[in-house]
Amino acid sequence: MPHLTLHIVEWELYPRRILIYLHEKGLLKSKHIAIVDQAPWLGTPLMRPVPSLELSRGRSIGPSVAIIEYFEDICDNPQEEWQKELAAMAKPSMRGTNLLKRAEMRGVYAIIEEASVLFNFASLRGSRRHAPVNPTNSAVANMALGLSKRSLSGIQDYYSKRFRDNFDDHDYGRDINIADIALFSLVEYAKELYGQNLVAGLLNLKRFYMAFDQRESAKRPHGFYPDDIVAQARDWN
């Protein structure tokens, strides 16, 4: 019986981030993690908050930042037998291999989180997908969208150092961190669902996105984003 149950809608921003993380970490197929897709209950009272990680005794963890940190903590210092089994199949720390790399990664991660919040706010005010609950306001949406892009411009230098011509699963995969996953999932979500290019004019981030998009963890099956949701999301005021 799985010790953890992850509730998701796989194509939404933050659940997608966690799924890519689990793939890169080597934990996606673990017998200790059950994954439950909440998409059939989307928009109904039966839907659970996503993402959420259900633990024993009815406890749960969210949002995505906390869930990913929880997995990293387990793998760095497993206590119970099932945690030791999980850690044994996991790839090395994705928070950085030394104090400096961890500090740099956390700074970049914080900027990506800021950009994510701003983009989500922009979509709430600019996209017809949310219009029934949140009336659109093009001026507010455009301001938030611009601020999201400005935030991302602050990590251009970091990705000039991290970009590699060979970004396949065997080479660069040894150095993937959770900021990389957060950045990719944000840019992908904005582009593929909402039709918004957050890395226009940001060459280092564009190169990073195009390279990461070729990784096994980033593959999207045909129809990954539901057509009806895409049509609404791309109707931008």
Image: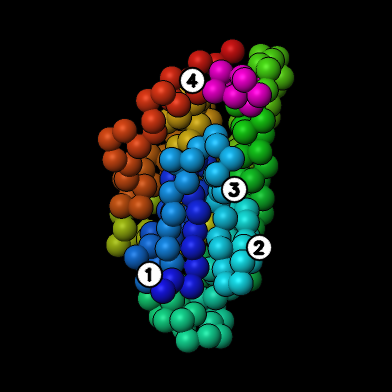
Quarter that holds the N terminus: bottom left
Tell me the mark number nearer the camera, choosing from 2 and 3. 3
The residue that disc 1 covers is 30
Tell me the mark number nearer the camera, choosing from 2 and 4. 4
The CA span between labels 4 and 1 is 35 Å
Judge from the rendering whether residue 226 lies leftward or rightward of residue 107; answer left or right: left
Say whether marks 2 and 4 touch (CB < 8 Å). no
The CA span between labels 2 and 1 is 29 Å
The residue that disc 4 covers is 232
The residue that disc 3 covers is 49
Instruction: Tell me which secondary structure the magenta stretch mostly adopts.
Output: helix
The mark nearer the N terminus, 2 or 4, is 2
The stretch of residues the image draws in magenta is 124-133
- Residue type marked 2: Ala
Secondary element under disc 2, as helix, strand or loop, is helix
Q: Determine the residue positioned at 63% across, 66% down.
A: 59
Q: Determine the residue positioned at 43% across, 71% down.
A: 2
The mark nearer the N terminus, 2 or 3, is 3
Residue situated in front as seen by the camera: 208 or 91: 91
Secondary element under disc 1, as helix, strand or loop, is loop
The mark nearer the N terminus, 3 or 4, is 3
Say whether marks 3 and 1 touch (CB < 8 Å). no
Secondary element under disc 3, as helix, strand or loop, is loop
Q: Residues within 10 Å of mark 1 (few under 14, many from 20)?
A: some
- Residue type marked 1: Ser
The mark nearer the N terminus, 2 or 1, is 1
The residue that disc 2 covers is 103
The mark nearer the N terminus, 4 or 1, is 1
The CA span between labels 3 and 4 is 22 Å
